[in-house]
Amino acid sequence: MTNSQLHNLTTTNSKASKMIVELQRHGIQHETLLSLMLSIPRHDFVESAFSHLAYSATPLPIGRNQTISQPLTVARMTQWLLEHSRMGRVLEVGTGSGYQTCILSHFFNKVHTIERQQSLFESAQKRLSQLAINNVEFLHGDGHLGWPAALDVDAVIVTAMANKVPLALMDCLKDGGILIMPLDQPAPMIGCWKKMGNQWKCLGESPAHFVPMLEGLVCE
């Protein structure tokens, strides 16, 4: 996004525009990502009672005791992928409202996304269908178990906090692939790692707080 475009944003009252300005101030500089986040109706991905806060710098409830991450967290994770990952297939664990899924669908050829909460799974499917997004495959499943069929992906992105990386997620990631995941030890943080054979190279990390990554399915 050019300086003149940034100036135009700062002179409007648009909540989405102000969000973009804040993202730039915090180091998000990928122009296509910023333009995309400006265009996506984030207010459609939160509970209606909180729609007026959709573009603010805070996580918000989406139902079932789950949240949509604040814009900076979503932008940072996505920018890491754009900087380091091949744009083939990505596996997302924690579909939630489908906001991160929507963003991923504009950059990756194919998105596989897993959600353990049936109601969130169904509403995210409906929401992305209404946006005419057709390169996403949804699964109502347990993210700890990975994708049920054999899958080789270029990136894995997890949107819930765990104390270790599930083996199934490590196994489906190609050599040279990128893992983005929140971990709660030694301190709560989200990191970006590159798989290099049996080794992992940290490419970035940042303090973060997420809902916990739980096992099993919720069928209601």
Image (spheres, rainbow, N blue to C red):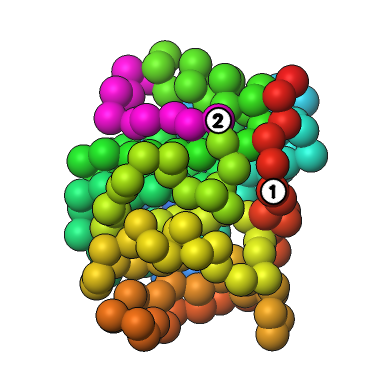
Q: Quadrant of residue 149?
A: top left
CA gap, disc 2 to disc 1? Answer: 12 Å
Label 2: which secondary element = strand
Which quadrant, please, contains the N terminus? bottom left
Residue 113 lies left or right of residue 183; in this view the side is left
Instruction: Compare residues 80 and 115 and report the one nearer the observer.
Output: 115
Give the residue type that dot 2 points to.
Answer: His
Residue at figure coordinates x 36%, y 85% from the top left: 199
Q: Is residue 17 above or below residue 3?
A: above
- How busy is the neighbourhood of tag 1: few (under 14 within 10 Å), some, or many (20 plus)? few
Residue at figure coordinates x 20%, y 49% from the top left: 88
Which mark, residue 215?
A: 1
Residue 76 lies left or right of residue 73; in this view the side is left
Residue at figure coordinates x 37%, y 30% from the top left: 137
On the question of residue 116 being in view, the answer is yes
Which mark, residue 59?
A: none
User: Per the image, is 130 magenta?
Assistant: no
Label 1: which secondary element = loop
Residue 123 lies left or right of residue 193; in this view the side is right
Give the residue type that dot 1 points to.
Answer: Glu
- Name the residue beneath numbered marker 2: 140
Give residue 54's position: percent from left, percent from top. Answer: 63, 38
Q: Magenta residues?
A: 131-140
Q: Quadrant of residue 75?
A: bottom left
> If you read the primary sequence from the N terminus, does the residue marked by circle 2 or circle 1 appear first?
2
- How busy is the neighbourhood of tag 2: few (under 14 within 10 Å), some, or many (20 plus)? many
Q: Is residue 95 above or below residue 26?
A: above
Give residue 8's position: percent from left, percent from top. Answer: 35, 47
On the question of residue 55 being in view, the answer is no
State how many labels appear: 2
